[in-house]
Amino acid sequence: MELTFEEALAFIHGRLKFGNRPGLIRMDAILDKVNHPEKKISTIHIAGTNGKGSTVAFLRSLLMKAELKVGTFISPYIKSFNERISIDKVPIANEKLIEYVKIYQPLIKELDRNEDVKGLTEFELITAIAFSYFYEKKVDVAIIEVGLGGLYDSTNVIKPELTGITTIGYDHQNILGDDLKEIAKQKAGIIKEGIPLVTGNITKKVLSVIEAVACEKKAVMHRYGVDYRAQSLAWKNFWGELFDYKTSTKKLKSLKISMLGAHQVENAAMALKLAEIYLLMKGRFLIEEKIRKALESTFWPARMEKVSKQPLIILDGAHNEHAMHRLVENLKNEFADKKIYILFSALQTKDVKTMLQQLKNLPNTDLYLTSFAYPKAIKLKDISNLQIEGVKIIPSWSKWIKEISSKIKRDEIFLITGSLYFVSQVRKFLKSKRN
């Protein structure tokens, strides 16, 4: 029987009902059915609370400039579902996704008859599909982004050649807990015996947890601010950042990136360190000119993304407290003298009240809260119970965006932020209005 792309997606999304079920037993079972493609490809594993997506994007650009064929597995998507599984920035084709769903459907049906391994989740399924696709297409390297946590994440079946942990902050507390050290321990679960580890800008107290695991696993660490450094430079002539990069053996001056925010400098520096280590392992080298081009050309949607110049509309998927803290920092640094209108929405599982309080700390800001079409999105009735003074509730975000966009003055800013699922919907809406 022929399968349409919509039917294939429906099957994948249909596995969502099994939710987040920690453990690798189901992954091992399904991958055993397809002869473990994950064991036959070179991988780099990236975990962290925030910064994973941007770090993966920078790293992909750098490795592609070294003429490697690079697979990437990311979550969530912004533009289309297929971008979760890409090779050299090209998302998996609809036809290929259909092909893999047809392969995996009978295998999953078989597993579902076994009480021990039944209930493969949506994320586990697309992780398995990604491994199959990367193996079939013979990528030189696959950069694998952790979905949630690390230790029990479905991606943690791989034996990577290099690992990275970007940041540690509060997120998914219902699963990972409320203690940063416990969260760090979960992220550190991706560290493998003797495999090098690169860490991002992580506070000393929390980094000590990762260091202990790395020591136990005899994994050599490369730490931000110790083994490699990035110094942001003042630069106001383009939308992006300028920074110096330094290690014990390398100095690169005035590197440009086209993404805004001090945290993006950290992500770019971490990606550069990861690329250096990986290419050295493979006996390759990247000249300075290619490094510069790779970093400057890297784009990652919905990360301080400017989608309109007049009025100035910015999208940023700050979907947890840690990301919101960095967003507020960026807004204070870049737009301290501007009036900002902010539209925010989030998932029910997030600490919405705390994130709203963070946004309220911004001067000269009007704050609006809404809901959106997603099963776990915060509902309007829940919003009214938050009782945050000065926060206005918007029943229909699409209608309101049209109204506010026509009223914003030339020197004012309109920011849409919160859940990446929400920002993705808004992005699609805004792009459709421009076409």
Image (cartoon, rainbow, N blue to C red):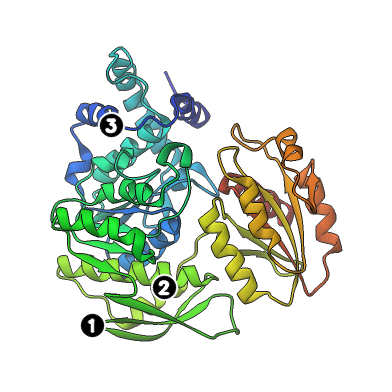
| Residue underneath mark 1 | 248
Relative height, residue 366 to residue 30 (above, below)? below
Element class at badge 2: helix
Name the residue that disc number 2 marks.
295
Mark 3 or mark 2: which is in front? Answer: 3
Q: Amino acid at mark 1?
A: Ser
Q: Amino acid at mark 2?
A: Leu
Q: Quadrant of the C terminus?
A: bottom right
Residue at (50%, 61%) from the top-left corner?
A: 300
Q: Nearer the viewer, mark 1 or mark 3?
A: 1
Q: Is 27 located above or below residue 257 in the figure? A: above
Classify mark 2: residues with Cα within 10 Å, few (<14), some (14-19) or many (20+): many
Using the numbered discs, state the Cα–Cα distance from disc 1 to disc 2 in whole angstroms.
21 Å
* Residue that carries the numbered disc 3 in the rendered image: 27
* Quadrant location of the N terminus in the rendered image: top left
- Does any portion of residue 304 appear in the rendered image? no
Amino acid type, residue under disc 3 in the picture: Met
Identified at 70% across, 35% down, the residue is: 382
Q: Foreground residue, 14 or 173?
A: 173
Give above or below for 247 relative to 347.
Answer: below
Query: Left or right: 433 with respect to 262?
Result: right
Q: Residue at x 36, y 32 (%)?
A: 125
Decide if residue 140 is in sight here: yes
Q: CA distance from mark 1 to mark 3?
A: 40 Å
Q: Quadrant of residue 200?
A: bottom left
N-term mark: 1 or 2: 1
Horizontal and vertical percent position of residue 422:
63, 46
